[in-house]
Image (spheres, rainbow, N blue to C red):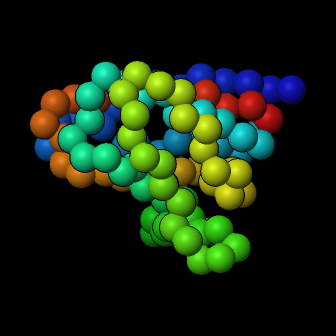
Amino acid sequence: RQSAVESFQILSGATQSSNLGIAGMAWGELETPAALTGTTISIEGLSGDGSTWLPILDKYGTAQSVTFVASRKIRLPDEVFGGQQIRFVCSSQGSDRTFYLHTKG
């Protein structure tokens, strides 16, 4: 099985991460920093035409997100791994925040 760890940041004043490639991955965990402005991190997927970010919904129509817990690995919902790219969206940050996305195919 393929596995990967990708670091990314949400910069001070920003509300979203860069694009993260997840093609071929089956599950993953979000490793969180020691602090975050806000308590919820939403997860969006890139549309098929590559031009629009959309909320990722489960079979009940619920947008996928995780509740922030400092310095932890948080298992991401399986629905997140149906596409090619994701990004994380949160409140505007007061400082640069570094995260790690751990994935396995």
Q: Nearer the viewer, residue 50 or 82?
A: 82
Image quadrant for the N terminus? top right
List the single residue furthest toward the bottom: 61
Q: Give percent across and percent down for residue 96.
A: 22, 29
Answer with left or right where residue 12 lies relative to residue 35. Answer: left
Answer with left or right where residue 2 lies relative to residue 18. Answer: right
- Whether residue 46 is visible here, answered yes or no, is no
**Quadrant of residue 42 within the rendered picture:** bottom left
Q: Give percent across and percent down for residue 62.
A: 55, 71
At x 65% / y 43%, what residue is drawn? 22
At x 43% / y 46%, what residue is drawn? 67
Answer with left or right where residue 97 lies relative to residue 45. Answer: left
Q: Is residue 103 above or below residue 39?
A: above
- Whether residue 62 is visible here, answered yes or no, is yes
Q: Give percent across and percent down for residue 7.
A: 46, 25
Q: Nearer the viewer, residue 94 or 53?
A: 94
Image quadrant for the C terminus? top right
At x 60% / y 34%, what residue is drawn? 29
